[in-house]
Amino acid sequence: MENNQTYISELSEKVLKGVEKAIRKLVHENAALDKMMVIKDEDGNIKHVPAKDLLKNLPPQ
């Protein structure tokens, strides 16, 4: 049972890293094209933000 939980935990970590990598790539590509992106803030409000602004606020890898 513990082996199964370890597998699920490792798989979840890999999936999250892949999603983070894909989001980072999307922001970089949109910033290079000077595009806007749609995000949701902490209150659940939808906002249109320049990708360049998002790029500035991305956490380091």
Image: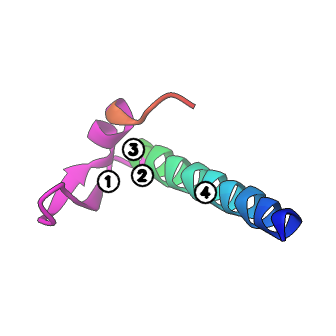
Q: Which residue corresponds to the image point at 18% horizontal and 56% vertical from the top-left?
A: 41
Residue range corresponding to the magenta coloring: 33-56
Given the image, on which type of amino acid does mark 1 rest?
A: Lys
**Cα distance, mark 4 to mark 2?**
21 Å
Q: Looking at the rendering, which quadrant does residue 32 occupy? A: top left
Is residue 48 a member of the stretch shown in magenta?
yes
Quarter of the image where the C terminus is located: top right
Residue corresponding to mark 1: 35
Given the image, on which type of amino acid does mark 4 rest?
A: Leu
Residue corresponding to mark 3: 31
**Cα distance, mark 4 to mark 1?**
25 Å
Task: Say if mark 1 contacts mark 3, CB within 8 Å.
Answer: yes
Residue corresponding to mark 4: 16
Decide if residue 53 is on the left or right side of residue 33: left
Q: Disc 4 on helix, strand or loop?
A: helix
Whole-percent x, y for residue 54 in the image = 32, 42
Q: Looking at the rendering, which quadrant does residue 58 occupy? A: top left
Task: Say if mark 4 contacts mark 2, CB within 8 Å.
Answer: no
Label 2 Cα neighbours within 10 Å, binned few <14 / some 14-19 / many ≥20: some
Quarter of the image where the N terminus is located: bottom right
Task: Say if mark 2 contacts mark 1, CB within 8 Å.
Answer: yes
Answer with mark 4 or mark 3, whichever residue precedes in sequence: 4
Q: Disc 3 on helix, strand or loop?
A: helix
Given the image, on which type of amino acid does mark 3 rest?
A: Ala
Q: In this view, does 59 lie above or below 1?
A: above
